[in-house]
Image (spheres, rainbow, N blue to C red):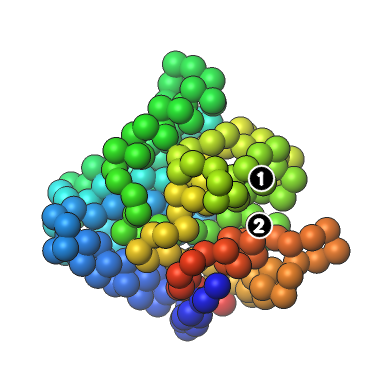
């Protein structure tokens, strides 16, 4: 495990700095392989980053965007990560990017996960960029404490792809990329904001609490490369 902590003065500065870092990584992917890929997370934290990234001048027609995880809700739901990305990232210059959703209508969550696994595999691994977030409970992606498939999601023996997750803190059934699908991204970022999340991260890096290790701690412990952490108070 290795991580590099980037402490930014405020959330606006963080959004701009992270957009610069990610757009450079995507441009490198395009230059090297003719295309680039990025998996992004939901929640309220990345909105400003998405808006900043959407204005960066790269060849977005060669970029494919997908999600680290998703709620099993249609894209017209206010809870949808698809909607969050559509309304904040796939705008301006980035409107030219291709988007690969995880949610698929017409079946249950397991069926949607199977379809999403095929679609994401067609993008190609490893991702050029994967952006992780973190909840105050120490979850990242949809690796929730107490999740019904948490061990499976975190195991490197689990094939790359999308699986379902049920957990008390998750609300809806979730669809999530497995750790195996994320761990070797060429640029792997953890984006967090606020002192409370920094406190949780420090606790996770120290081994967790009386209930055991936090999922984010397990992820950081097992990533083979370096995780770049972007944080602002």
Outermost residue toward the front?
157
Residue 37 in sight here = yes
Near mark 2 (Cα within 10 A), the count class, few <14, some 14-19 or many ≥20, is many
Q: Which residue is mark 1?
A: 150
Q: Is residue 192 above or below residue 137?
A: below
Q: Measuring 83% from the left and 58% from the top, which residue is drawn there? A: 211
Q: Which type of secondary structure does the marked residue at label 2 adopt?
A: helix
Q: Is residue 100 above or below residue 110?
A: below
Quadrant position of the N terminus in the picture: bottom right
Report the number of discs. 2
Mark with earlier residue (2, 1): 1
Residue 75 in sight here = no
Query: Is residue 33 or residue 110 the one in the foreground?
Result: 33
Quadrant position of residue 233 = bottom right
The percent coordinates of residue 22 (x first, y second) are 32, 66
Q: Measuring 54% from the left and 20% from the top, which residue is drawn there? A: 108
**How many angstroms separate mark 2 from mark 1 (CA)?**
8 Å
Q: Is residue 195 above or below residue 223?
A: below
Outermost residue toward the top?
106
Q: Which type of secondary structure does the marked residue at label 1 adopt?
A: helix
The percent coordinates of residue 55 (x first, y second) are 23, 61
Q: Which residue is mark 2?
A: 215
Are the two marked residues, 2 and 1, in contact with CB atoms closer than 8 angstroms? yes
Query: Is residue 223 or residue 44 the one in the foreground?
Result: 223
The percent coordinates of residue 42 (x first, y second) are 48, 50
Q: Measuring 32% from the left and 72% from the top, which residue is drawn there? A: 21
Outermost residue toward the right?
210
Quadrant position of residue 214 = bottom right
Q: Is residue 165 left or right of residue 6?
A: right
């Amino acid at each position: 495990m290795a991580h590099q902590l980037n402490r930014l003065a405020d959330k606006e500065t963080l959004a701009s700095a992270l957009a610069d870092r990610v757009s450079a990584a995507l441009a490198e992917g395009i230059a090297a392989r003719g295309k680039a890929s990025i998996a992004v997370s939901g929640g309220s934290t990345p909105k400003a980053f998405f808006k900043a990234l959407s204005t960066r001048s790269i060849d977005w027609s060669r970029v494919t965007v997908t999600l680290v995880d998703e709620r099993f809700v249609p894209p017209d739901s206010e809870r949808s990560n698809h909607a969050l990305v559509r309304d904040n990232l796939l705008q301006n210059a980035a409107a030219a990017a291709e988007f690969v959703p995880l949610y698929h209508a017409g079946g249950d969550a397991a069926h949607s996960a199977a379809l999403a696994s095929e679609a994401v595999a067609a993008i190609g691994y490893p991702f050029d960029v994967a952006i992780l977030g973190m909840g105050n409970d120490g979850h990242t992606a949809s690796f929730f404490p107490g999740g019904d498939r948490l061990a499976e999601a975190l195991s490197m023996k689990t094939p790359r792809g999308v699986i379902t997750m049920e957990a008390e803190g998750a609300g809806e059934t979730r669809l999530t990329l497995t750790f195996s699908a994320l761990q070797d991204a060429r640029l792997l970022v953890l984006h967090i904001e606020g002192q409370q999340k920094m406190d949780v991260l420090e606790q996770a890096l120290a081994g967790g609490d009386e209930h055991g290790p936090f999922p984010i701690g397990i992820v950081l412990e097992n990533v083979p490369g370096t995780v770049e952490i972007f944080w602002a108070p």
